[in-house]
Each structure stands twice: as structure tokens, then as C-alpha cells.
Amino acid sequence: MKIKKATFLVSSPNLKLCPESDLCEFALLGRSNVGKSSFINTIANNQRLAKTSNTPGKTRLINLFEFETSSKPFLIADLPGYGYAKVSKVEQEQWQKNLEGYLLGRKNLKSCIQFIDARHEIQKNDLQMHEWLAYNKIPTFTILTKCDYISRNETASKMAKLKKYLDNDVLAFSSKNRYFVDDFLNYLENLL
């Protein structure tokens, strides 16, 4: 599958304000600064499509993007990161409420994609999110990001460990080197 065009659609604070669509949608979940926005820019081959930042917690809304492909079009929802962010507890609780509302109520949600940073061991909040998704029977697969920071052998080892531990598919990814982009697009095409 090849990406022909990628377009930013809208930023919404909650599900109620998200436009309805009949396209398959994939929701990106991960800790703050795990590389979700860089991932969007890399698969779109457009470094300005999604805003990136070195400051955790910059994504505060549900950001929807439409991808036209050589196969079927689809949507990606970039969701606020969980974990560290310099915002109040009240604001974090509101994010969580909006996130749960979206994940439980979005009719065209095909799968969640949980992002985990290859440079670190899986974190407690990654596990909590994974358990919540499994409990709510939301289909999920995992992307191991920032694989350019570790060796190919270490990448393979971490992928195998995560696959066994999380009991779902795990794909490697590097925005910096564009490694594994085709692997991801082929995997996605099978889901569509």
C-alpha cells in the first residue's frame, strides 16, 4: 500500500465534536513524547503534517488525519499522550475522560495502535493502558518506536519480548531512518 495524500482534518476536545465518518479509523496511544506525531509525518512523507515537540503533553486534543492510499482510505486519530505532562491534575483527568469516551464510543474505530519507546523498558502506565484496552475488548497492536537508537538485534529481542508479554502483534518503527514504514503499511492494508 502506498500513501497518495495525507490531510489534517480537525482537532476535537471530545468524541461529540469529532466528525462522523465511515472510514476505518486507527487511534494512536502512547506516553507523552513517544513519537506519535513523528510517526504520522513519516508515513505521510510530510514533516509538517502533525505538530511535533520536545515538550511532553503538547497534544491535548483528538487530532484527525485522513490518508488516501493506493488501496483504501483511512483515518488516524492522534490522541493526547498519557504519562508526564506539565498540566494540572484536573486537566489530566479531563483528558482521560475524553480519551475513554472516544475509545469506547467511536463506531468506526478499527484498532488502537499503542506506541512504546524502544529505548526504555515498558512503563507502568503503558501496562495500565494495555490492560484497559484488553478489558474493554478494543483491538490493539503495538509499535516499538525510536528503533534507530538501538541495534537491529536489540530491536528484534525487544519486539519478541513485548509480543509475548502483551500478547499482540508488535511492529518496529523509526521516523529518523524511515525503517519499517513499508512493514507498517503492509500490516495496515491487511487490517483494512
Image (tube, rainbow, N blue to C red):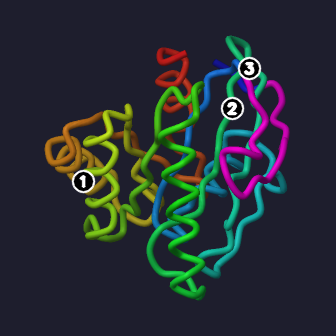
Say the numbered circle drawn on residue 69.
Answer: 3
Q: Nearer the viewer, mark 2 or mark 3?
A: 2
Q: Residue at x 14, y 42 (%)?
A: 164
Front residue of 155/5: it is 5
Q: Residue at x 26, y 36 (%)?
A: 168
- Binning the other alpha carbons within 10 Å of mark 1 as few (below 14), some (14 to 19) or many (20 upward) gives many
Say the numbered circle drawn on residue 75.
Answer: 2
Q: Going from the N terminus, do you reach mark 2 or mark 3 first?
A: 3
Q: Quadrant of the C terminus?
A: top right
In the rendered view, would you say 167 is above or below 56? above
Q: Quadrant of the N terminus?
A: top right
Q: Residue at x 51, y 73 (%)?
A: 93
Query: Mark 1: which secondary structure?
Result: helix
Query: Mark 3: which secondary structure?
Result: strand
Which residue is under mark 1? 158
Q: CA distance from mark 2 to mark 3?
A: 11 Å
Give the percent coordinates (x, y) of residue 135.
25, 42
Amino acid type of disc 1? Lys
- Binning the other alpha carbons within 10 Å of mark 2 as few (below 14), some (14 to 19) or many (20 upward) gives many
Count the numbered circles shown: 3
The magenta stretch spans which residues? Answer: 4-21
Query: Mark 2: which secondary structure?
Result: strand
